[in-house]
Amino acid sequence: MSEKPAPETAASAAAAPERPATGQTPILQARGLVKRYGRVTALAGADLELYPGEILAVIGDNGAGKSSLIKALSGALVPDAGEILVDGTPVRLPSPIAAREAGIETVHQSLAVSPSLDIATNLFLGRELRKPGILGSVFRMLDRSRMRDEARRHLDDLGIMTIQNPGQAVETLSGGQRQAVAVARAAAFGNKVVIMDEPTAALGVRESRAVLDLTLRVRDNGLPVILISHNMPHVFEVADRVHVQRLGRRIATLDPAGCGMADAVAVMTGAVDPADLPEEAHAPGGSL
Ligand SMILES: Nc1ncnc2c1ncn2[C@@H]1O[C@H](COP(=O)(O)OP(=O)(O)OP(=O)(O)O)[C@@H](O)[C@H]1O
Ligand SMILES: [Mg+2]
């Protein structure tokens, strides 16, 4: 049940590197997204591609439109123009619920966990499991033991062993463990994409480490991840490709194995024109 998906066959990705699978149809794609707030243009024709099996980092200066882009992809804002495609098919995401139904789960920066509730209840918040039969359908009784069992399974799938008891109140967890619960929830219910907005911003070194490991595990369990982060060492450690957002648009997609953090920051701030970087700095898959 919790087996990993079979690895890509070499034949299907003959010319492309094994990961990311940039030769394939993007799982999630944005084309020419525009969003204006009065005179402010938050998105000025933004593109993005997320391929199977990858962690795509999104970096950019303050106000570059990262959150706006992620909000459009998670149904939290409706763009004025442009389109969003899931598996190559145009979709409308008029609400966060619509995005979830399309398989896109988002871990927002301000964690939407309820501290006074236990871990299992938080995992199933809004999607509670009811008891079978009339007890559940008529009396709306929650099936707590099944939720705890399944919560344990989801935590185990992601190797979150530091949490021992799914019945523990979230307020008693460390910041990193809380973040882990939010990531576990997204991984449990996302069946296409997990988006994480600055997941390590408020965490210490050890907790950040745990969340980064978790992010890698989510990818390795078969869910591609979009990771928004200002933390360049984190980005360069886990990302397969780096989307650079500037002035409301993507201006480059960099290969973290082919360029340095200083290059990425220079492109991000406009100090360097991405066209002036060597070819190996650019990642395959929608750089232009
Ligand atoms: N609700 C809003 N009303 C007016 N302007 C907005 C609104 N949301 C975003 N903007 C503007 O759109 C631009 C892009 O904002 P966005 O939040 O997407 O940037 P960001 O890249 O996430 O920045 P940060 O790194 O600071 O989080 C900014 O100039 C911002 O002021
Ligand atoms: Mg933001």
Image: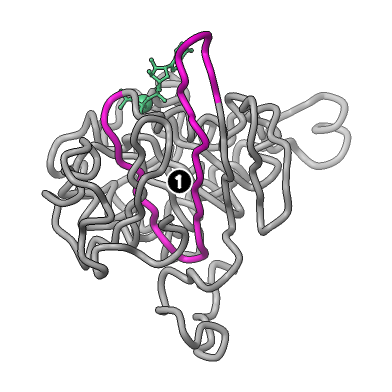
Q: Nearer the viewer, residue 62 or 273?
A: 273
Ligand 2: give its quadrant. Answer: top left
Q: Position of residue 226 (x, y in %)?
A: 43, 48
Q: Nearer the viewer, residue 247 or 190?
A: 247
Q: Position of residue 92 (x, y in %)?
A: 73, 37
Q: Nearer the viewer, residue 37 or 164?
A: 37
For the point 52% across and 29% down, which residue is it?
71
Report the side of 128 relative to 44 (left or right).
right
Q: Quadrant of residue 281?
A: bottom left
Disc 1 marks which amino acid?
Answer: Ala
Residue 38 lies in magenta, yes or no?
Answer: yes
Q: Position of residue 172 (x, y in %)?
A: 30, 26
Quadrant, the N terminus:
bottom right
For the point 45% across and 14% down, which residue is it?
40
Is any atom of residue 236 visible in this view? yes
**Residue for badge 1:** 184
What element does badge 1 sit on?
Answer: helix
State which region is magenta.
35-62
